[in-house]
Image (cartoon, grey):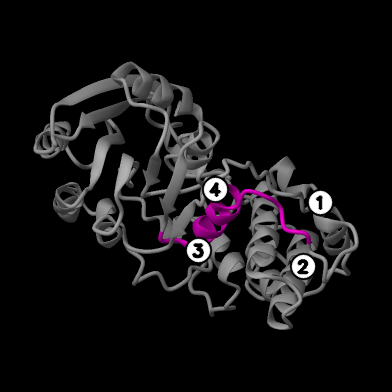
Amino acid sequence: MKYIGNKTRLLDFIYDSMCDFGIPMKGVFFDIFGGTGSVGRFFKEKGFRIISNDFMTYSFIHQYVTVKMNKMPVFTSVSNDGICGVLDYLNNLEPKRGYAFENYAPSGRYNRQYFSDMNAMKIDSIRDQIEDWKNEGKISQEEYYVLVCSLVNAADFVANISGTYGAYLKIWRSMALKQLTLLPPSISDNNCDNEIYQTDANELIKRVDANVLYLDPPYNERQYAPNFHVLESLSVWDKMELKGKTGQRDYSKTKSLYCLKREAGAAFENLIENAKAECIVLSYNNEGIIPREDLIRILSKKGHVKEYTTDYRRFRTESDNEHRQYKKCDDKVIEHLYIVKVNS
């Protein structure tokens, strides 16, 4: 999944830094800003029991399947061949014009270009069928999440965007013209009772004890809700009336304080004050809106802070690339990893 701040390329850096610091690879790993779940999945495979959280529904569902679950459900009520049979059935449904077509396809009511006409119609037929099965009691909650996760992943793969859903491209990228195809999500087994939440991080922090608390909060002013609104709509399938040229959801109640310059520092300080963990690991890059000296000051209240750094290529959207035609920009940013052994 294309995602702002995705840590997939930094997993080895995070792991190596934690090993250098001397953090034991066991116990409870609490990923409170879970995003795509890449960090949670990585440390799940290292043997940790994972507790993960994210406020957005598409993220919650993705993590529920790939982080919480340890095995694929069997889908006995709708398939004689497990996940392969049910996905084959869904992939071959007759496409239809529905909510996704009208809102996200060029021939739909609003002429938006997030998906080709055919892929938008396939999304409609598949997503409606999944919802019907759930409402009819033919699939369990876990089976429902697996199918929604598969569809969201497939839709994201063929979306006509450059990086986020803040806007669609005016011309078709080659991947967007490929046929949408559902694939089974990858599920690993750590033989642990993993937990997934969808709630406010600053409230959840008060209720969870962990060996390792991993923090990857939003670091800039890009709110996640408007930038990934299409994935949210496909996940909740409430068929909300959308607004504006790009078809935005009402996200007035899902704004993160961590994306607001005046609020981010205080929100982070409150989070750290309530943290209950043996070690705290914070990922934050040099372009974050909370100054480095404030991060170190706040973390130092819990214990001695050790800092690790690496550089990597920045996340860019199409608008960023257009801007670069007129202003030379450095493609590298520095990732700071702050690790604290919490005072007992």
Asked if residue 220 can be seen in this view, the reply is no
Q: Which residue is mark 3?
A: 57
Q: CA distance from mark 3 to mark 1?
A: 25 Å
Which of discs 2 and 4 lies nearer the camera? The answer is 4
Chain-order first, disc 4 or disc 1: 4
Residue density around tag 1, few if under 14, some if 14–19, many if 20 or more, within 10 Å: some
Q: CA distance from mark 4 to mark 1?
A: 28 Å
Mark 3 vs 4, N-terminal side = 3
For the N terminus, give its image quadrant: top right
Disc 2 designates what residue? 126
Label 4 CA crowd tier, 10 Å (few <14, some 14–19, many 20+): many
Q: Residues within 10 Å of mark 2 (few under 14, many from 20)?
A: many
The image shows residue 63, relative to residue 97, as above or below, that is above
Image coordinates for residue 138, horizontal then vertical, percent = 76, 76
The residue furthest top is 20
Q: Secondary structure at mark 4?
A: helix
Which residue corresponds to mark 1? 179
Q: Is residue 65 magenta?
A: yes
Looking at the rendered structure, which numbered label has been put on residue 67? 4
Q: Amino acid at mark 2?
A: Ile
Q: Which residues are magenta?
A: 55-74
Q: Nearer the viewer, residue 195 or 127?
A: 195
Magenta stretch: includes residue 50:
no
Q: Which is the main secondary structure of the residues drawn in magenta?
A: helix
Image quadrant in which the C terminus is located: top left
Q: Secondary structure at mark 1?
A: loop
Which residue occupies 25% across, 29% down? 338
